[in-house]
Amino acid sequence: MIQVLFFGPVAERIGKHALQVSHRAGMRLQDLRDELSAVYPAAFEIVCFVAANGTHVRDLSLVIDDGCEVAFMAKFSGG
Amino acid sequence: MQQAVRIQQEDFSQDEEIRALQASSKRMGGIATFLGCARDFSEGREVSQISFDAYGSMALSEMQSLRLAAIEKFALLDARIVHRLGTVKGGENIVFIAAGAEHRRAALEACSWMIDELKQRVPIWKKEITPQGDCWVSPHP
């Protein structure tokens, strides 16, 4: 399984902070993003950053391992 | 002594943070600090409170890496970063950054760089709670 996390404005648009998605061999971050954005288009309109296991990822062709924690995040506004 | 990088609900003491920074080296000739506070007015509306959401483990890890990067980039003797979460009222503290160096210029530049980087790299979001409703804050440059 892949644990998908949402925070702040993205979580509010989705209505939850986490989802579990079944892992498939060869699944890329882009595949996961495409799959979820089809279900939650309003939330993914504001997604600007992606993290895998707590690290920023810019290349969405990255293949996801089973058990990975992925976060789709809006622009940050801390500080 | 508390950790140099922290995320916490409770308020912090600037004096204690500066004392901890000074205690790390007697070669420190300049300390620059940044204190971010909650405003009670924003975008033409009164703001009663600000609440925060964060990807806590990643935020802490990014702040730790930011501190180490600043120490290396500006040859600092030490640096500290504290960010609050939870709910903060107008006028209360949100974030504190301190940079200590042998001379003032490195400390001042490092402090400015750290708050700019924090805003771009650290997964924390703030929501303004107003009498007209709640609103997630768009990042400020």
Image (cartoon, coloured by chain):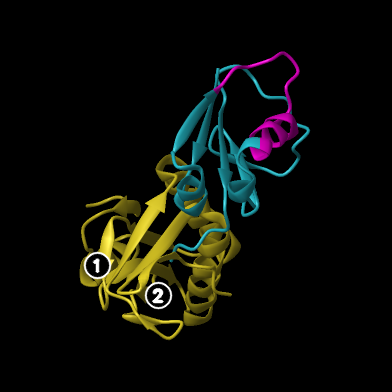
Chain colours: A cyan, B yellow
Q: Is residue B116 left or right of residue B98?
A: right
- Which residue is pictured at 49% across the width and 54% down the height? A9
Q: Amino acid at mark 1?
A: Arg
Q: Which residues are magenta?
A: A21-38
Which subunit holds the residue at mark 1? B
Q: Nearer the viewer, residue B131 or B13?
A: B131
Kindly give the residue lying farthest to the top in the view shown: A25
Q: Amino acid at mark 2?
A: Phe
Q: Nearer the viewer, residue B18 or A11?
A: A11
- Which residue is pictured at 61% across the width and 50% down the height? A42
Q: Residues within 10 Å of mark 2 (few under 14, many from 20)?
A: some
Residue A33 among those drawn in magenta: yes
- Read off the residue under disc 1: B19
The quadrant the C terminus of chain B occupies is: bottom right
Q: Where does residue A5 sit, x and y in percent of width and height?
A: 50, 36
- Read off the residue under disc 2: B34
